[in-house]
Amino acid sequence: MTTIAGFRRHFLYASILSIMIIGLLFSTGCYSSNDEFMTSSEQDLFIVTETYTTEFILYGDDMNLDPACHVKKIDAITGENLQMDDTYKFSVLVINDINENAPVSDDELKLLISIVDQGKLPLFYFGKRLINPIISEGNYTTFDI
């Protein structure tokens, strides 16, 4: 009788341990298929290309975005260039001025601020030259990278 009770106890411990290990493998993604789990960058890409289709309006230097992202490259800041394409749920303006190759006139800056303040288009500015003029015109947050 001791042998049967000992066997049951060891079997129970082994079963519980096996369930815990299998659960841990599934929860951490160590055991996964490409269809079931995505990395955080794959999830982000899926969100902007499928769930909330987003158009990136890029002004300035090129950026290395995933080819699945829809990028509309513009060469001037005008009302027409900043119009959202109806194909997409969202548009985002990205000004890449890290190398100071994205000139913005006073009139263009006023147009930018007006469109951003009205909530029509979010703005992501990468650079230093326009930080102070942009901040002085509205309620904006900056991040140093």
Image (cartoon, helix red, strand yellow):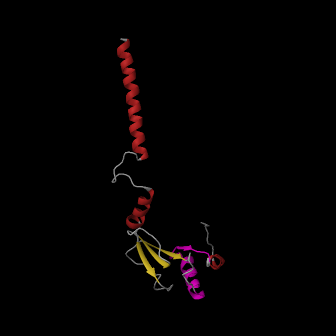
Q: Is residue 83 visible in the rendered structure shown here? A: no
Where residue 25 sits, quadrant-wise, is: top left
Residue lying furthest top in this view? 1
Residue ID at (42%, 66%):
48
62 is higher (above) or lower (below) than 105: above
Q: Where is residue 128 shown, x and y percent of the image?
A: 61, 75
Where residue 88 sits, quadrant-wise, is: bottom left
Residue ID at (47%, 77%):
58
> Count the marks: how many?
0
Q: Is residue 121 magenta?
A: yes
16 is higher (above) or lower (below) than 30: above
Residue lying furthest front in this view? 99
Q: Is residue 85 visible in the rendered structure shown here? A: yes
Q: Is residue 85 magenta?
A: no
Quarter of the image containing the N terminus? top left
Q: Where is residue 74 shown, x and y percent of the image?
A: 46, 82
Q: Left of 81 or right of it: where is 33? A: left
Q: Nearer the viewer, residue 6 or 121?
A: 6
Q: Which residues are magenta?
A: 105-128
Quarter of the image containing the C terminus? bottom right
Where residue 30 sits, quadrant-wise, is: top left
Q: Where is residue 89 shown, x and y percent of the image?
A: 41, 71
104 is higher (above) or lower (below) than 1: below
Residue ID at (44%, 69%):
65
